[in-house]
Image (spheres, grey):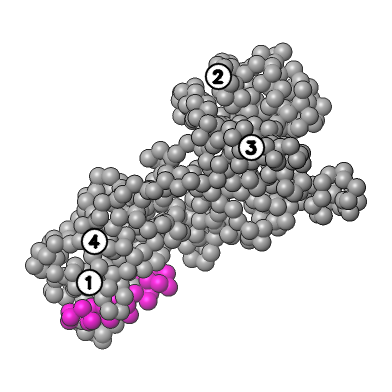
Amino acid sequence: MLCVGLVGVTGHLVEVEADLAAGLPAVVISGLPDTALHEARDRVRAAVVNSGQRWPNRRITLNLLPADLPKFGSAFDLAIAAALLGGSGELPLLPLDRVVVLGELGLDGTVRPVRGVLPMVAAAARAGVERVIVPAANAAEAAVVPGIRVRAVDTLHRLVSFVRDGTPLIEPEAVCAAPGGAGPDLAEVAGQGLGRRALEVAAAGGHHLALLGPPGAGKTMLAERLPSILPELDDEAALEVTALHSIAGLLPPGGRLLRRPPFQAPHHTATVPSLVGGGSGLARPGAISLAHRGVLFLDEAPEFSRGALEALRQPLEHGRVRLARSRGGAEYPARTQLVLAANPCPCAKPAGDAYCECPPQARRRYLSRLSGPLLDRIDVQVTLPPVRAAELMAAAVDSESSATVARRVAAAREAAAARWAVLGRRLNAEIPGPYLRRPPWRLPGPDTAELRARLDSGSLSARGFDRVVRLAWTIADLDGRDRPDRDDVGEAIQLRTGDGT
């Protein structure tokens, strides 16, 4: 029988073999199974008997090939049961030749849904398999993979009837379009022209963003509205995001592809494994991977543990998380936009206000929890002023809506994608620095004079130099210019440091 095993988000075709020999009745499973797979012998035995089939009282050896690939989870139950019944002569397996079978068995013979069906079916399609059988609850999810025929079962008895008598299996229901919900709109943000501009630039170029300022300035409101101005995911990105949510067991019912960029906002008590992934056995994706192609928002960022924040540095740089475990490693994509929000001090009162109770040392100590190396990876860093009464009382119709800003963001992204197509990249934030410092993309010397002076003085790192240049390209794309000019570089410096000209 054929099944699929997952290592991280990557699926591998697995052959399930069953050998029935004379000897004391026993069931032995080989092929690096985990605890859930070891317990499959009890689940499968009860399911076979309670489905009206005869259990072979012989020595049963089950092998899962390739034997050196770790196997995790209960998705092998249904394939094991079919291999056993075929080996005992109870079931002719010709109708299941070159068919991938997935599903967990209940003790009464019901077939229960499993996590990760979408990447499993996608892996089967890449391996040349054309037919799969999945649990009925996972049928809609599996059907989104193109080029493969999906059928479903709700019980082991239905599978046996199909093989013996040709009884039709369950066909997946047609997937309806996801209902469009009215999410948070940028028009609801009062004032904050600088914050809105920073958000638009970050969205257009895929840049990381840090929002500093007093409570009530709109940091959280701006961050929560970033997904509303991002373009919908294309087919490839939607499959990636949906597969990650399938593995984590967070896929909403209905089997639809996730087209909206995901938004993850973990609590400040989040641990390192919850942020970057982890767990015993097979490491599960963390918040940064669940925010792949979307937004990871850390509100009250200085309240997060130092270890959790520093663990984000490598994924932010490379766009992937590699989790090493004693039984093998797992790799998950993590190309996300990080948004940090922080108050200026522990008492969270306006900076410089007479009511602030924090001495200068406490303020410096609080913000120093965001380390220099982490902040150096944040392209846009802006300090928001307090909201004025006139801005708060202004009518919402005076502010641009998310739809209006999203159109400009989409146009800027299309311009960047056309320009960087020769490099196989789509966003300005993804372009390696050396390409931007060489012809034909190197900016003229007069336009980068201030930028080079900051680099020579040590106030800007080499990484910061490249990030400012990427910001300048994004600003030019938003304004409809082919190349950045001196004003674009100046605005990029201001968005990066807050003190540009």
Determine the residue positioned at 56% across, 23% down.
477
Residue that protrudes farthest toward the left in the picture: 165
| Closer mark to the observer between disc 1 and disc 3 | 3
- First in sequence: mark 4 or mark 3? 4
Report if residue 35 lies within the magenta region: yes
Name the residue beneath numbered marker 4. 152
Q: CA distance from mark 2 to mark 3?
A: 29 Å
Q: Which mark is residue 395?
A: 3
Q: Which mark is residue 156?
A: 1
Q: Is residue 15 visible?
A: no
Report if residue 472 lies within the magenta region: no
Point out residue 59 in the picture as x, y percentages from the top left corner: 25, 80
Are the two marked residues, 2 and 1, in contact with CB atoms closer than 8 angstroms? no
Determine the residue positioned at 72% across, 22% down.
490
| Closer mark to the observer between disc 1 and disc 4 | 4
Determine the residue positioned at 23% across, 71% down.
155
| Residue type highlighted by circle 1 | Leu
Q: Which residues are magenta?
A: 30-54
